[in-house]
Image: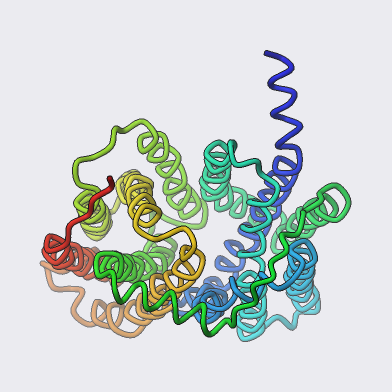
Amino acid sequence: MKNVKKNELFELRDFLILWSTQSVSQLGSSITAFALTLWLYEKTGSSLSTAALTICSYTPYVLMSVFAGAVTDRFDKKKTMLGCDVFAVMCTITVFLLFRANCLMVWHLYVLNGISGFMNTVQQPASEVAMTLIIPPKHYQRTSGLQSLSRSLISILNPLIATALYAFAGLNGVIAIDVCSFLVAFTALLFFIKIPEKKSDRRESVRKLVKEGLVFLKENPLIMTLILFMSGVNLVASAFDAVLPGYVLPNPKGGQAVLGIVTSCAGAAMIIGSLIASALPKPRDRVKVIYLTMLFSLGTENFLLAFSREPVLWCIGQIIGWILVPIMSANLDVILRTTIPVELQGRVYACRNTLQFFTIPIGLFLGGFMVDRVCEPMMSIYGDLSILKALFGSGKGSGAALMMLVLGVGGSLICIITGRKLKKYHYNEG
């Protein structure tokens, strides 16, 4: 038995080193991103300004992901990852130098986030292929679980660590931790991990790969409808992310520490949801599970936050909103993997990424815009009306509460309308 475990550890050596060190680096980057959100909100008091940070980093991913997978197949994966890491840390160091010189401006963060987002767009597919190349096929399920666990833990830890570091050490301390985490990951990848290169004589054009993926989606309306449904879910969820800081930070019972705790509840819920998803038996109707779980999540969470004033209820809302996401994701993943032929999955997934995630920067912009330019001004004028005051409170943050109600209604309608449309299609898992 001991020999078996030793053999498994040896087989997974490169994966364990890469996974653990890259997770540390991702945690460092997430801490910096969260701290910059706090810094920017302190400077501007604007939900739209803070949302624009994520918009700038996510837009390159949406625009380029459809091509990035095919492009990175042509280059050495290890060199690609190392190069992207260097560019990303240079952006972080630039922020540090500008901040130390008291020259840091909002537009600097937007430009640097855009560059960092572009590097991530190239690095992500290279990293995914690298993982496939260093993991023995018999360990795919186990290693996938470890990667899911690390993502959930980062979601929990990054807001808590970021708020604590930012409070005690400021932006200087946060960036120092980020740079140290980069050095750990970079050193491990450069000196201790060997990534074999898979040679292929087939050199298809990027344009042809993209076209084949789009043709498949056009000929499979169930898959296309599910992807477009998820783009609608992402629109509401990203708008929620833009609204949340403007809802929690100015609230008398809110603040930076509370925002960190509330945000961390989403990661905790994801961990619980992942355990539930792995234990549940195969459902009778995977398609139905997808839209019903999202109906419950989007409706309940947004309505609860819209009408509540207590941090405990905000945390409960986050848990409700995220605990069913892994269940939805697991069923969606099964449908995609069993419906899309293996030889087409790469290009179809690339097209899926663009179609499914293009609404995220749009949602971030709309969420911030609606709070700053519509809901908050409206509540400042009409907020003294007894019904509005009773429902959404008063003062700064009441407009964000109103926007939560709008998102709850919008998310529920998307789920109900799409659910009726999906009933026309039949999925047979076989």
Picture coordinates of residue 370, whole percent (x, y) = 32, 80
Q: Quadrant of residue 377?
A: bottom left
Relative to 193, 317 lies left or right: left
Q: Quadrant of residue 135?
A: top right
Image quarter in which the C terminus is found? top left
Q: Is residue 2 above or below residue 339?
A: above
Tally the marks: 0
Picture coordinates of residue 408, whole percent (x, y) = 22, 63
Question: Which residue: 22% across, 82% down?
Answer: 381
Relative to 240, 18 lies left or right: right
Res 75 visible: yes
Picture coordinates of residue 356, whole percent (x, y) = 39, 70
Question: Which residue: 18% across, 79% down?
Answer: 382
In this rendered view, identify the residue nearer to me: 280 or 132.
132
| Farthest-out residue, top | 1
| Farthest-out residue, front | 201
In this rendered view, identify the residue nearer to me: 113 or 427.
427
Question: Which residue: 66% across, 69% down?
Answer: 73
Res 44 visible: no
Question: Which residue: 43% across, 50% down?
Answer: 262
In this rendered view, identify the residue nearer to me: 38 or 158.
158
In this rendered view, identify the residue nearer to me: 202 or 231.
202
